[in-house]
């Protein structure tokens, strides 16, 4: 098993991809992207303080649920890392959008390696998922 990356290393890879990506999106106006505007539309009728508080509460619940699932180990841990891998693959939407519009979109530059990292993570998780079905994980 030494040639397989540990799940914590895969989490670190996801973090290394997301920090610059989130920064690029924050600095280049992703908050004005039509998809983001649509997703956040239900919060528009709330006061800014209420919307921020509700967003914080939802994110805290997601953080706690994810932490609990990761801490449980086994397939729950693999599921958490797999979701991160899938979300990294999904960041390929930036390149698809750029190819259709022939223009830059917020987050494009830092999104380029993300689908590759996501595919690597998903491949690693799939391999470990098969092992988890028959043995105890030591990750």
Image (cartoon, rainbow, N blue to C red):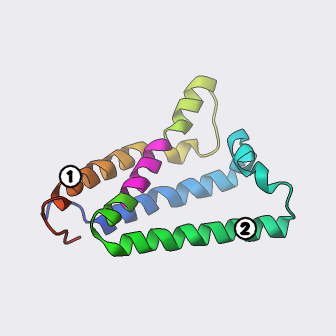
Give me the residue at 50% from left, 44% from top.
91
Give me the residue at 13% from left, 65% from top.
135
Foreground of the two, 37 or 32? 37
**37 to 96, vertically: above or below:** below
Circle 1 sits in a helix, a strand or a loop, which is it?
A: helix
In x, y percent, where is residue 94?
Answer: 56, 38
Foreground of the two, 95 or 89? 89
Q: Residues in magenta? A: 81-91
On-image quarter of the C terminus: bottom left
**How many numbered tags mark residues here?**
2
In x, y percent, where is residue 37?
Answer: 75, 46
- Precedes in sequence: disc 1 or disc 2: 2
Foreground of the two, 111 or 71? 71
Instruction: Report how far apart the C-alphas of labels 1 and 2 lie in the structure.
Output: 38 Å
Give me the residue at 51% from left, 74% from top.
64
Is residue 83 a member of the stretch shown in magenta?
yes
Residue 106 sits in quarter:
top right
**96 to 116, vertically: above or below:** above
Q: Of circles 1 and 2, which is in front?
A: 2
Task: From the image, tell me which residue sits under label 1.
Answer: 127
Task: Classify mark 2: residues with Cα within 10 Å, few (<14), some (14-19) or many (20+).
Answer: some
In x, y percent, where is residue 128?
Answer: 21, 57
Residue 60 sits in quarter:
bottom right
Foreground of the two, 117 or 102? 117
Observer able to see residue 112: no
Task: From the image, tell me which residue sits under label 2.
Answer: 54
Asked whether the beta carbons under mark 1 and mark 2 sit within 8 Å of each other, the answer is no
């Amino acid at each position: 098993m030494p040639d397989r990356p540990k799940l914590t290393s895969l989490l670190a890879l996801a973090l290394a991809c997301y920090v610059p990506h989130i920064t690029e999106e924050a600095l280049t106006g992703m908050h004005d992207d039509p998809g983001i505007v649509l997703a956040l539309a239900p919060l528009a009728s709330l006061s800014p303080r209420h919307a921020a508080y509700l967003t914080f509460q939802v994110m805290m619940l997601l953080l706690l649920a994810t932490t609990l699932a990761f801490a449980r180990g086994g397939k729950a841990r693999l599921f958490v890392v797999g979701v991160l891998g899938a979300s990294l693959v999904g960041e390929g939407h930036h390149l698809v959008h750029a190819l259709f519009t022939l223009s830059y979109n917020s987050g494009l530059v830092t999104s380029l390696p993300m689908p590759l990292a996501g595919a690597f993570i998903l491949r690693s998780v799939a391999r470990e998922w098969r092992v988890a079905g028959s043995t105890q994980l030591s990750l």
